[in-house]
Amino acid sequence: MSYRTRRRNPRVCGYELGAELGYGAFGRVVYATHVETGNEVAVKIISKRRSEVVNVMARREINILRSVSHEHIVRLEDSFEDDSHFYLVFEL
């Protein structure tokens, strides 16, 4: 199944979330589409329930990625959070 398969997927802050692209120690990355523009992105989802250390590291990652621009570093397009997760929106 392609990560672009269209079916009813969960939505978060204007993004329709799709298939998982990968995962790591602190979270997972999913394919997503901006509902209004159709822009395809990757969204890194980090659970706030893991530990306070992970929460601090997530906030630090967001701040660092907002401040850098380099051809070999994926561009952070947006970030937001809810009560249980951080969401980092990257170029696909």
Image (cartoon, grey):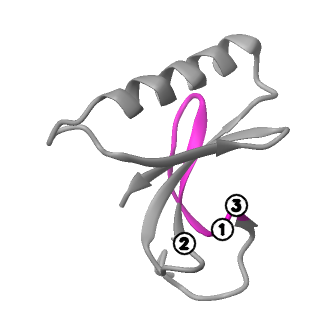
Q: Secondary structure at mark 1?
A: loop
Residue 69 percent across, percent down from the top left: 23, 36
Q: Nearer the viewer, residue 40 or 77?
A: 77
> Which residue ends up furthest to the bottom in the rendered image?
6
Residue at image point 82% right, 28% down: 49
Residue at image point 57% right, 17% down: 57
| Type of the residue with mark 1 | Gly
Residue 42 percent across, percent down from the top left: 46, 58
The residue carrying pointer 2 sits among few (fewer than 14), some (14 to 19) or many (20 or more) residues within 10 Å by Cα, namely some
Q: Secondary structure at mark 2?
A: strand
The residue carrying pointer 1 sits among few (fewer than 14), some (14 to 19) or many (20 or more) residues within 10 Å by Cα, namely few
Q: Magenta part mainly helix, strand or loop?
A: strand
Q: Secondary structure at mark 3?
A: loop
Q: Earlier in the sequence, mark 2 or mark 3?
A: 3
Q: Nearer the viewer, residue 1 or 31?
A: 31
Is residue 88 visible in the rendered image? The answer is: no
Q: Which residues are magenta?
A: 12-30
Residue named by callout 3: 13
Magenta span includes 47: no
The residue carrying pointer 3 sits among few (fewer than 14), some (14 to 19) or many (20 or more) residues within 10 Å by Cα, namely few
Residue named by callout 2: 34
Residue 48 percent across, percent down from the top left: 76, 29
**Residues tagged 1 and 3 counted as in contact (Cβ below 8 A):** yes
Q: Which mark is residue 14?
A: 1
**Residues tagged 1 and 2 counted as in contact (Cβ below 8 A):** yes
Q: CA distance from mark 1 to mark 2?
A: 6 Å
